[in-house]
Image: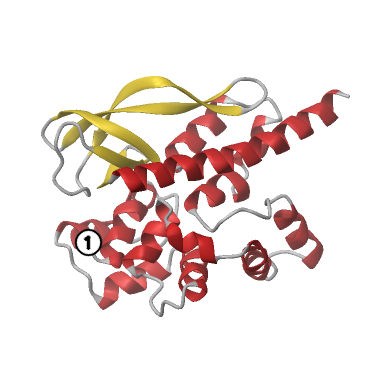
Amino acid sequence: MTSGPVLFARYAYPPNVLGDWGPDRADDLLQRVAHLADDPDLRLIAQGFEGAWPYLELIAHANGIDDPLDPGVVEAYWVGNHLLDNVGGRALHDSMEERFRPRVSARRSSNMTEGIPVDSVPTHALQVFGVYPWVGLLRTGWVEEPVRVLDRCRIRWGKVIRLGDGRAVVRFRRLVWDDRELVLGPNEDEEVVQAVAPRLAVGDWVSLHWEWVCDRITPTQLKALREGTRRELAAVNVASRSALATLRS
């Protein structure tokens, strides 16, 4: 079984190497993933990912788990699992307000969380669709780049169609904007990097972050990832339709 810190690094590395997220330690992350090195330095690097670490702490605390980098906690944040059932909506809202309040006024902090549905859970999908500002930009008419970033930043799922030298071709469904809401489009194939993933075989289902394969996933994980993504998309689309109706009225 992959250790929690190494599993976290597999998902955190793709945006980190682009310079988009977390501490400037991409080379360290890649080296430790390659050697399955669960060491104190990797744990320290993980704590530097300010967007994810509070969610990990919240999931762990709600389940009586001492280690925020427990493999089950890490899986819950990136993909989703049963541990999320124990994190109440009130605890999530309180946690988010506590995080944002030092950076903004109390009033703005409340505004940032009031649009988060009460049934939301602390996952990367929530961070992408509910916290990051890209969804709001769609309502301004700027579509192409926000949709691209949302699609790349979310944890996607795909099926391995072909394998090559350090690359894989996966079949997945890209996010599209239909002028009213975000939906999953038809299947398409994409060549991605598999350097941080375990050994793969054609037919495997995998999780993806940006242009990288992160992990081989089980049917249970695939179901959790699909359901979590659709839950957050549904919440975003309700808000988008309401906002667009207000703008057009």
189 lies above or below 41 = above
40 lies above or below 158 = below
| Left/right of residue 36 with respect to residue 116 in the rendered view | left
Horizontal and vertical percent position of residue 94: 67, 68
Horizontal and vertical percent position of residue 85: 52, 61
Horizontal and vertical percent position of residue 31: 19, 59
Q: Residue at x 41, y 72 (%)?
A: 68
Q: How was the colour assigned to the protein in this rendering?
A: secondary structure
Amino acid type, callout 1: Thr
Which quadrant of the structure image shows residue 160? top left
| Left/right of residue 184 with respect to residue 89 in the rendered view | left
| Quadrant of the drawing holding the N terminus | bottom left
Q: As rendered, which of 136 and 80 lies closer to the eye? A: 80
Residue bearing mark 1: 2
Marker count (numbered): 1
Q: Residue at x 40, y 42 (%)?
A: 223
Q: In this view of the protein, can residue 52 be seen by the observer? A: no
Q: In this view of the protein, can residue 158 be seen by the observer? A: yes
Which quadrant of the structure image shows residue 207? top left
Q: What residue occupies the far right of the structure in this picture?
A: 249
Q: As rendered, which of 229 and 124 lies closer to the eye? A: 229
| Quadrant of the drawing holding the C terminus | top right
7 lies above or below 152 = below
Say what secondary structure mark 1 lies in.
Answer: loop
Horizontal and vertical percent position of residue 48: 43, 68
Residues packed near mark 1 inside 10 Å, few (<14), some (14 to 19) or many (20 plus): few
| Left/right of residue 221 with respect to residue 229 in the rendered view | left
Q: Residue at x 48, y 52 (%)?
A: 124
Q: As rendered, which of 101 and 5 lies closer to the eye? A: 5
